[in-house]
Amino acid sequence: MLLKAQSIAKAFGPVKVLTDVSLQINEGDSIGLIGINGAGKSTFLKIILGELKPDTGELIRQTERIGYLEQFAESSSEFTVRDVLGRPYGHIENIKRRLREIEELMVAGGDIDWNALAEENAALESQLAKSDMDDEENLKAALEKVGLSADLMDRTMDTLSGGERTKVMLSRIVVQAEDCDLLVMDEPTSHLDINTVEWLEDYLLKTHCSVLVISHDRYFLDKIATRMLEIDHGKSREYKGNYSDFIMKKMLDLDRMEKEYRKYAAQKRKQEEIAAQLHKDQWFLTTHKTREKLIAKMEAKEKPEESREITVRIQAAHKSGKNVLTCKDLSVELGGRTILEHVNLDIHKGDKIGIFGSNGEGKSTLVKALLEQIPSKGELWVAPGAKLGYYSQNHERLDPKLSAEEQILTVIGKDRRADARQMLARFLLTGDEVERPIATLSGGQRARVAMCLLLLDETNLLVLDEPTNYLDIPAKHAIEEALTEYDGTILTVTHDRYFLDTVCTKMIEVKDHTTRFFTGTYSEMKGRPNVKEVVMDADEYRVLSPFTNWVTGKKYAKGDRVLITPAEQKSFEWALGQGKLKKTGGRQRKKVNVQKDEDKKGARGPGFLSARGGTGGPPRA
C-alpha cells in the first residue's frame, strides 16, 4: 500500500465539499478520479498531497516519492523551463536540498557526527558536479519526448503557448517518474493534441509508478485506468475497470438502488397505513405501537441522488441541397509561409465531420478559410441555402462585460427575461451565475453560455471549434447527444477522441500542410472496432402487455420497466403503436451501441443494434 484515505471530509465555511471520501492506492494501480466540475476532486488531491488538511478522516501515506502535475501549467515570468523541470522533485534538487540540510546541521553544531556529515557532504558535492551534466541531458531528452526543442530550456514559462507549457509540465513528470512511486495528475490532457495524449497514454502504461489522474478525457480513461473513483455529492464510490466499465456499472447501481428504494418506500407506506388504521379502529389498544416499532426497525434504503442534467436540443433549419461545401486545390499562406495546400473537400448534407491533427498543423486555419474569415487560393463554394452556426473555443461571441442573461437578451429581445433564464437553466446556469459578468464565470460556464447562444440560431451547418473544452463529462454527454440527433451538417475541430467516435462519421486529419479524408470514426481510422458507444437520456416506459422486440430479440413481460433512448425509438415503434408500452415520466442516462450506417442497410433509423428486422414488430413471413 502506498496511500490510504479513509472517510475524508472537508468544508470551506458553510460549504461542505467532501463528506465521506475514501481511497486506497497500491503499487501498480492506475486510477481515474472523476466527478462534475465543483465536486471536490482537486480538493481531494490537495489533501492527498498534504497541501490541505482534512476536517475529519484519516490519511496514511507510506511514501513521499510522489510526482505531481498541476491542473494549470506554470506561467510565471520568474521561472525558465530549466527551473520548472528541476522543481521540486528532480534529482539535482534532492541533492541540493540535502546539502542545505547538512550545512544547517553544521551551523547549528551540537551532538552531531562531524566526520560522517563531512564525508556525506563531499560525496554529494561530487554527485552534484557529475549530475549537473547528466541531468542537463536528461532534461533535454524529456523535452524531446513530448515534442519540444531543447532550445526552450532558457525561455521563461510566460513566453510559451498554453500547449507548450503543458508539455513542459509533462516533461517534468518524465523527469520525476524515475524517482517516484506515485504520479498524481490533474487534467493532464488539457491543451494537448491527440499525438501527445497518445504518447502520454503509452508512457503511463509502461511506467513503474502507480497513477492517480483527474480527467474529463473519457478515451484517455478507457486506455489507462483499471479502477475508477467517482466523487458525487461529497461522497465517493469506487468501480473496477475503465471509464466504459464505470458507465455500465453505475447505470446498474442506480437502477438497483432505485428499485430497492421504491420497494422500501412502498413497504413502509403500507405498514404506516396499517398502523394508522389500527390506531383508528382500536384506539384503546397499543397494537399500532407494535407496528410502528416494526417500521422503525426496517432497514432504510437511501434514495439515489437526483442529478441535475443539461438538456439540449439543437433545431435544424430547412435542409440545404445535397452539396453543402466544396473546395478544390485550396491553399492558405500567412506571413509568407504556406500553412495549407492542395486541400480538396466535398461535404454533403448530413455529413458529421471531425477535424483533428497536431497543434500548429493548421486545423483552425482550415476552418477559418472555409468560413472565408481569412484569404485563400483555389476554388471554394458554399451552398446558398447553408445557414451557418459557428462555435469558437475562445468564445469571441461573448461580451465579457455582460451577464449571461444580458447576453441572451441581446438576441431574443430585452422583454423576454423569463425565457432567457429558462434557456440558461437548461444548461444548469441559475441564480447569481446568470447575473454575474461573463468575465467572472469559469471556463465551463462560459462554454455553456456560448452553446446556449448557438441554440438560438436556426442552422443547417454547424462549424464547431473545440466544443467540449472546459466541459465536465455529463455536459459533454449532453452536447454529444444533441449533435448526434442534429439533422444538419457538422464540421468540428476537436482533440476529444471520444467525441469523434460518438458524433462524427467522417474524419479529416490535417498533417504536413494538407488534409487526409477518411469515412468512419476515429477509432475505425486507427483500426479499432467498428462500433461507437453513445450515452443518451432515456425515457422510462412500463410494459402493459408482453411482447418481443424482434430487432434485438429480447422478450419483455408485463410490468417490466424499459429505458428507451431516441436512438432506439424505431426498434420499439411497433410495441409503442400497439399500446404495449406506457411512458412513466422517469428519465435516466443509458449507454447504447450505435452501428455505422453501412452496417445498418435496410434499417430506418439510428441505434439499430442488429439487422434482424424493421421496426421491432413480428418478423415478416
Image: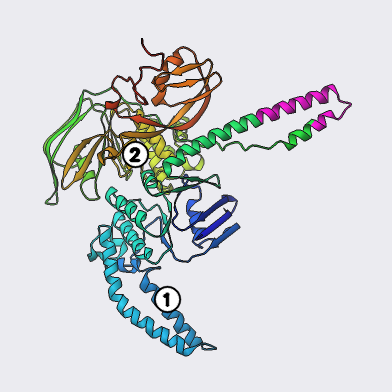
Report which residue position mark 1 lands on.
97
- Residue 545, given in percent of the width and then of the height, sits at 53, 15
Please tell me in which quadrant of the rendered image residue 493 appears: top left
The circle on residue 481 is: none
Task: Kindly state the secondary structure of the residue where label 1 is placed.
Answer: helix
Please tell me in which quadrant of the rendered image residue 125 appears: bottom left
User: On screen, 427 above or below 174?
Assistant: above
* Residue at image location 11% in from the left, 51% down from the top: 336
Residue type of the residue flagged with mark 1? Arg
Q: Is residue 269 magenta?
A: yes
| Local crowd size for mark 1, using a 10 Å CA cut-off: few (<14), some (14–19), many (≥20) | few
Looking at the picture, tell me which residue is in the foreground, 91 or 414.
91
Q: Is residue 255 magenta?
A: no
Quadrant holding the C terminus: top left
* Residue at image location 53% in from the left, 37% down from the top: 253
User: On screen, 26 above or below 509?
Assistant: below
| Local crowd size for mark 2, using a 10 Å CA cut-off: few (<14), some (14–19), many (≥20) | many
Report which residue position mark 2 lands on.
499
Q: Please tell me which of labels 2 and 1 falls first in the chain.
A: 1
Residue 78 appears in the figure: no
Describe residue 247's horizontal placement relative to residue 594 as left or right. right
Residue type of the residue flagged with mark 2? Phe
Describe residue 54's horizontal placement relative to residue 358 as left or right. right
Instruction: Point out the stretch of residues depicted in magenta.
Output: 265-290
User: On screen, 415 above or below 215?
Assistant: above
Q: How far is the residue under mark 2 from the one under mark 1?
A: 45 Å
Q: What predominant SS class does the magenta segment belong to?
A: helix
Task: Kindly state the secondary structure of the residue where label 2 is placed.
Answer: helix
Please tell me in which quadrant of the rendered image residue 382 appears: top left
